[in-house]
Amino acid sequence: MGEIVIGQLAHVGALLGAFPGVALLKWIAGHPLQFVEVVFGLGFVIFVHELGHFLVAKACGVKCEKFYLGFDVAGMKLASFKWGETEYGIGALPLGGYVKMLGQDDNPGAAAAEHERARAHGDLPSEPTSGPHAPWDPRSYQAQSVPERMAIISAGVIMNVIFAVLLAALAWRLGVKVVPAATSAVRPGGAAWRAGLQTGDAIVAIGGKPVTAFDEIRKRITLGDLSRGVEVTVRRDADGAERTVTLQPDTDIGVPSIGISGPMSLTIAPQADKLLTGAAAAARPALASGDRVTAIDGEAVTTHARLLTRLAAAADRPVTLTVERRGAGGGTERIEVTLDPQPRADLGVTMVPGGVKAVQDGSPAAVAGIRAGDRIVSIDGLPPGDPFSLDDRLRGRAGTPVSVVVERAGVEETLSVVPRAVTWVDESTMFATPLAVSSLGIALPVEATVAAVRPDGPAARAGLAPGERVVRCRFVEPGSDDGDDGVALSDAEPNWPVAMTVLERMPRGTKVVLRVEGDGPGRDVELEPEPVPDAWLPLRGLAFEQETRQEKAASIGGALSRGFATALEDLSMVYRFLEKLWSRQISARLLGGPLSIAEQAGRSAEEGPSALLLFLTMLSANLAVVNFLPIPVLDGGHMVFLTWELLTGKPPSERVVIGLSYLGLALILTLMLWVFGLDLGLVPRFAPAK
């Protein structure tokens, strides 16, 4: 039986980026051990599937001519040897594997050749099926009874399911790093943000069923009913209060999402010398990877959310961090670290704000009657000005009514809004994220079109003019000449807030290169950001590790139980993903081919053996489901033909089988071209928003 690994359908959240061949080669060069683990792991999943076909075929007396990992197209192979009657080998095309049985081939026209071979041996017994067929070799696949052929066909899928359980069980026995079901960031304008969720909120149940891990949230949101919404129970970090809200997941990035990121810890991230920027990079004494923050200005902090709250409250003044650091002898020392305030970076340009994208439930804007689609005309008689400074200006008016004029359907309306005090941080760090004006509870998209230029600012000195459009924003760090790929900008994807968030996390001295288009030819404009007076960044360039906990099954029985539950969840995930793909609730641009699978496998290998085992569990479940779809040339298609033969007493006509097989083959090849296009960047991952 021949199987092609087409795409990774289940692990939807991990396939949002392509992994071009050059990047893959760089990763292999830098991670040789993980590369070996990935190759072995992916090969093992395919091997198990083919082994199922092979063992059951042998048990039924079928002659197996070949057993290959990869495809030996045109005889091209990496290695092969013959043992007994079977040739074992590794093909040069690493897209799956196959078992070649006598009288069976995934090539729709191959049956004719077996007919001719059989006719040349008049002493062979008759075929055990009815109809005017030529006699078959008794050891051929076609000579077996229908139940035996069904067993051979289904054996690969059954083996994948069994090993999915075993792989997951082994992972849980070794111990798995689990990210708690809390939040470190809430996407402005997203489903969670609209419902009023904040940094630090923990999701304790979805649909009335408890959740304890962040990965469970992602899976259950994907499996949820998008038409009715998803019922989520939330516990607030500040007071422990719980409430249940119904969230309507967003699909603007192709996959159902409520717009949250997993929680961060209080431990400084690895490679602190590269990741810490701004004030954090200049802390006195220097912060180091592994330092754990325990207090700010003598007040203990126990969660990342409370750390952010304290930093936000003291954003305009120096703070003292108490950190615990492991000493060379294994002990722990306590260090007091001074962290200066960090001003926001300014390019001296004001971009065009769009209409209100979303309004937060229960916010001052919602109470005052501001709606999505409204355009802010003035605040207390003055133009709204730079949308990035709007929140800073309004926070000083907390508790005091302000007059806001909005334009709605061409008609202006004056509303009285009471800004609120904000003790949390809303950042535009996710794809196509609007700007949060937290004091009002609104999210504003910011177009990459210049509305105004501040005299004597960086933009004015570079010759930037109102009306010009920025299509890309690149960042050139000190000591670098070329910079990175930057952030793509368009009216369809208002990523200017994301670009500014990235700028705030860059090292001091970073230059910004804007690709500008206007009436004339496009040009690159280089700007040197300047600090903004009286506007401060709460996080100050700090970078922390993801918060995790270690979970381990206490016994083999417990590991098998958790392994079974994990495999069952992965199987159901693939089916629900396919269902949503069919109903167009999920974009086909989320599919991934071999390069995407290699990327995610590599990331999992870097996290450790258990993470790789869980990835292989998912991939094994994926292979089982995809290959059992009722598509001719796949196992599921063969089962359809065998079911027809079992019910009618004779196989479908050769014309029908060949016609449907070529149709199935065309579908598979089309899908392969699609996922390869996604992997190589020939097909964009996301269609422009409408």
Image: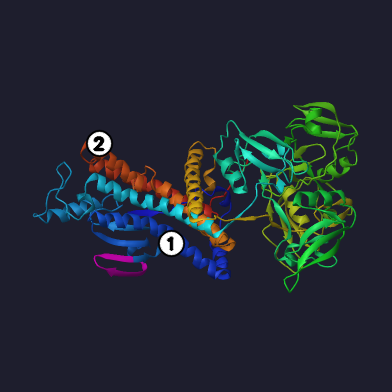
Q: Residue at x 81, y 67 (%)?
A: 286
- Left or right of 172? Residue 98 is left
- Left or right of 663? Residue 272 is right
Q: What SS does tag 1 mark?
A: helix
Mark 1–mark 2 distance (CA, rounded to whole Å): 37 Å
Q: Which residues are magenta?
A: 76-88
* Crowdedness near tag 1: few (<14), some (14–19) or many (≥20) residues, C-alpha within 10 Å: some
When asked about the image quadrant of residue 61, the answer is: bottom left
Residue type pointed to by label 1: Gly
Q: Earlier in the sequence, mark 1 or mark 2?
A: 1
Residue 30: x and y, percent? 58, 69
Residue 523: x and y, percent? 72, 56
Q: Residue at x 78, y 63 (%)?
A: 324
- What numbered label is drawn on residue 304? none
Q: What SS does tag 2 mark?
A: helix
Q: Residue at x 41, y 52 (%)?
A: 162
Q: Specify whether residue 665 is painted magenta.
A: no
* Quadrant where the image shows the N terminus: bottom left
Q: Is residue 490 visible?
A: yes
Residue placed under numbered mark 1 in the picture = 43
- What numbered label is drawn on residue 647? 2
Name the colouring of the figure: rainbow
Most foreground residue, 354 or 288: 288
Which residue occupies the extreme bottom position in the image?
A: 329
When asked about the image quadrant of residue 94, the answer is: bottom left
Q: Residue at x 77, y 27 (%)?
A: 410
Residue type pointed to by label 2: Leu
Magenta stretch, overall SS? strand
Residue 406: x and y, percent? 81, 30
**576 shown above or below 607:** above
